[in-house]
């Protein structure tokens, strides 16, 4: 796992085609924008965990 510190407006690129950008950062809260190709599935963690517990 890679842990990075980013400020609003900064971003990271994954595999050259997925951008994760910090759009807002308040005390204890973070808002991210994710730009990825349509064929890439993006699921919130709690939904991913609930789906995988059902299996």
Image (tube, rainbow, N blue to C red):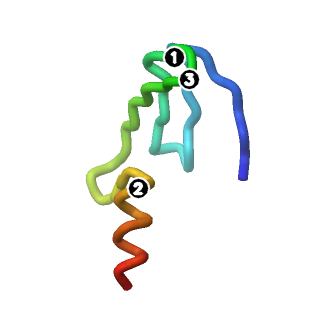
Element marked by disc 2: helix
Residue 8 % position (x, y): 53, 14
Residue 51 % position (x, y): 35, 71
Give the image quarter of residue 14.
top right
* Nearest to viewer (mark 3 / mark 1): 3
Residue 28 % position (x, y): 56, 23
N-term-proximal mark, 1 vs 2: 1
Element marked by disc 3: loop
Q: How many residues crowd around disc 3 within 10 Å: few (fewer than 14), some, or many (20 or more)? A: few
Residue 21 % position (x, y): 48, 27
Pointers 3 and 1 in contact (CB under 8 A)? no
Residues at marks 1 and 2, CA–CA distance in whole angstroms: 21 Å
Q: Which mark is residue 51?
A: none
Residues at marks 3 and 1, CA–CA distance in whole angstroms: 8 Å
- The residue singled out by tag 3 in the image is 28
Residue appearing at x 36%, y 55% in the figure? 43
- The residue singled out by tag 1 in the image is 25
């Amino acid at each position: 796992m890679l842990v990075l510190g980013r400020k609003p407006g900064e971003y990271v690129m994954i595999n050259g085609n997925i951008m994760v950008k910090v759009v807002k950062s308040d005390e204890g809260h973070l808002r991210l924008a994710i730009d990825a190709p349509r064929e890439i599935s993006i699921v919130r963690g709690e939904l991913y965990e609930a789906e995988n517990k059902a299996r």
